[in-house]
Amino acid sequence: MRRHTRPTCTSTSHQNAYEDNAIAIMKLLTLALLLATSTLAQPTAAVQLTAANIIAIGPSTASCAGSVAPSECRTAIQAAPWLAFSFSNFGHSAFSTQAALLSLILYETGNFTYSVNHYPGVPGQGTRNMQSPAFNLLYAKWLSESCTNCRLSAAQVANAEGASVEAVLDLVNGDEFGFGSAAWFLATQCTADVRAALATGTTEGWEAYMGCVGAEAGGERRAIWESIIALEHW
C-alpha cells in the first residue's frame, strides 16, 4: 500500500498568519526607530565654535593690543580651540549649553582680558570663569585624579594647597585648564536637572545655571547670554 505522510509545508492560512506577524513586527521596529530618533533630536552644536563666532559677539576679543592685563589677555583665535576642546571633553554638545558657558566666560573675564580676579582682588580667585579658591582646589584635585594625561599629580596639588591659594590657582590657570574650568564646573558641580534645563535654551534653564554658579541672572550677564542664544547655532 502507498504510505501517506504529513505534508511538510505549512497550510495557506498558517503562511498568511506568519506573513501578517512579520509585517506587524516590522511596523513595530520602524515605529521604535522613529521614536528613538525623535528622542535624540536635541539641539546640538553640529558646527564647532570658531574665533569668528566669538568676535561677532565680542569684537574686542579680536586683539589684545593695548590690554590692561597683557599677560592674561587672550584673543578669540587663542581661546576658541580651548573652549571647543572643553565642550567636547565634558560632553556639552548642545548649542544652548555652549552659549551659556561662553556668555559666563565673556562676562567674568571682560572678553578674555583677565584670568585672575582684580576687582576687588580676591586672592586665589581666577581661571576663565573666575572660580573661587575652594573650587579651584576641587578642580585641581579632579584633574590630578581623573585626567590621565593632564600632567598634574596629587603631590603637586597637595604642595600647592599647603603653600597658598595663589599656588593652587597657578596649577589650573593655564590656557588648557583655565578655559576648561567653566565646562568642568557645569559637569561636576551642577545637577543633572540643571544641565538638562540649560540644554533647552530657555530663560528658565539659564537662570537655573546662574543659580548653580551663584550669580545674579540679570543685567549685563543676561544681555550677553541673550545675544549668543539668539544666534541659535554656531
Image (cartoon, rainbow, N blue to C red):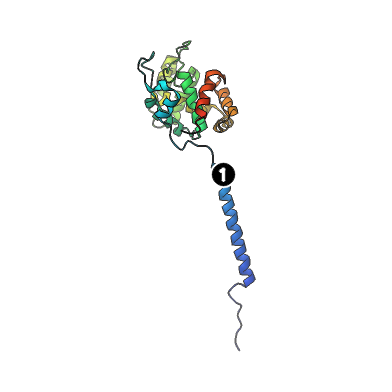
Tell me if residue 63 can be seen. yes
Q: Quadrant of the N terminus?
A: bottom right
Q: Residues within 10 Å of mark 1 (few under 14, many from 20)?
A: few
Q: Position of residue 71 (x, y in %)?
A: 36, 16
Closer-to-camera residue (89/160): 89
Q: Position of residue 150 (x, y in %)?
A: 39, 29
Number of marks drawn: 1
Q: Position of residue 163 (x, y in %)?
A: 42, 14
The residue that appears at 50% across and 37% down in the rendered structure is 44
- Figure quadrant of residue 4: bottom right
Tell me if residue 137 can be seen. no
Does residue 21 sit above or below 93 in this rendering?
Answer: below
- Figure quadrant of residue 200: top right
Amino acid found under the numbered disc labelled 1: Ser
Q: Position of residue 106 (x, y in %)?
A: 46, 22
Is 16 situated left or right of 165 in this image? right
Closer-to-camera residue (47/172): 47
The residue that appears at 62% across and 72% down in the rendered structure is 12
The residue that appears at 57% across and 43% down in the rendered structure is 39
The residue that appears at 54% across and 33% down in the rendered structure is 199
Closer-to-camera residue (193/207): 207
Label 1 belongs to which residue?
38
